[in-house]
Image (cartoon, rainbow, N blue to C red):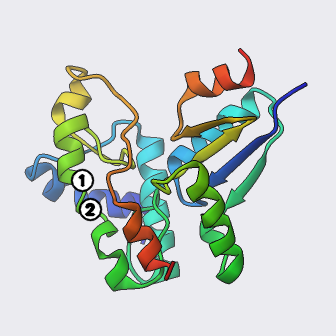
Amino acid sequence: MAPNVKVFALSTCIHCKQAKQFLDDKNVTYECVHVDLLTGDDRKQVIEEVKKVNPSLSFPTIVIGDTVIVGFRKDDILTALGG
Amino acid sequence: MTAQRLYEQLKTFQESKGYFFNDDKDMTLALLDSLLVNKERLGYMACPCRLASGDYEADKDMLCPCTYRAPDVAEYGACFCGLYVSRAWLDGSIPRVTVPERRPPEKVLAGLGL
């Protein structure tokens, strides 16, 4: 079964765009949250979620199953997707 | 203001300080465009690859060119965003790696009141 994929991104971030494009090209289904477009409690809640998996709070933070990938790292994404 | 115009405005001055735009022009223009988006949204050109708080004082260290550009370009040849790079990065004499975030997370949290 394909792992669950979640991308924490910023709408203005180029590495986030490239990572999403890479996943699109690989036909990977994923959920994407643009943290900069959230406000108030929604933003706080998501930031807490990101902080748990990536204490540096940087973007993109990509969660693939149990693996957390910080930044757009193609090889790590492919490995986490199972080759 | 367009990204292309911003590019032209900044290029000569930044190059005189040893900072060059990324030679991936599409990426560079996309980043400059995002800076203009942030200018429109926030009133200042916050780094597009970082989460801005909307508070100018709290975000001061990440106004482009950010406080972290110099140490990042010195260590990795590129800034966190990849907008500004060094001559060595451009001519291929150093490897092109993913630049890790240098900005302390406390700054992000403080700016957000967390």
In the displayed structure image, the side of residue B48 where residue A65 appears, left or right: right
Please state the horizontal and vertical placement of residue B94, each as a whole percent of the image.
23, 23
Q: Judge whether A32 appears above or below B44 on screen.
A: above
Asked which secondary structure carries label 2, the reply is loop
Please state the horizontal and vertical placement of residue B75, each as a whole percent of the image.
20, 38
Q: Residue at x 28, y 70 (%)?
A: B61
Residue type of the residue flagged with mark 2: Pro
Please state the horizontal and vertical placement of residue B103, each as a whole percent of the image.
34, 58
Cα–Cα gap, marks 2 and 1: 6 Å
Whether residue B46 is visible to the viewer of this picture, yes or no, is no
The C terminus of chain A lies in which quarter of the figure?
top right
In the displayed structure image, the side of residue A58 where residue A35 appears, left or right: right
Instruction: Judge by depth and name the residue closer to the eye, B97 or B65.
Output: B97
Circles 2 and 1 on the same chain:
yes
Asked which secondary structure carries label 1, the reply is helix
Return the chain for callout 1. B
Q: Which numbered disc covers residue A80?
A: none
Residue B60 placement: quadrant = bottom left
Q: Residues within 10 Å of mark 2 (few under 14, many from 20)?
A: some
In the displayed structure image, the side of residue B11 where residue B56 appears, left or right: right
Instruction: Judge by depth and name the residue closer to the eye, B77 or A44.
Output: A44
Q: Judge whether A1 appears above or below B5 on screen.
A: above
Q: Residue at x 63, y 74 (%)?
A: A44
Return the chain for callout 2. B
* Residue that numbered label 1 is attached to: B69
**Of discs 2 and 1, which sits in the foreground?**
1
The reply to whether discs 2 and 1 touch (Cβ–Cβ < 8 Å) is yes
Residue type of the residue flagged with mark 1: Arg
Q: Which numbered disc covers residue B65?
A: 2
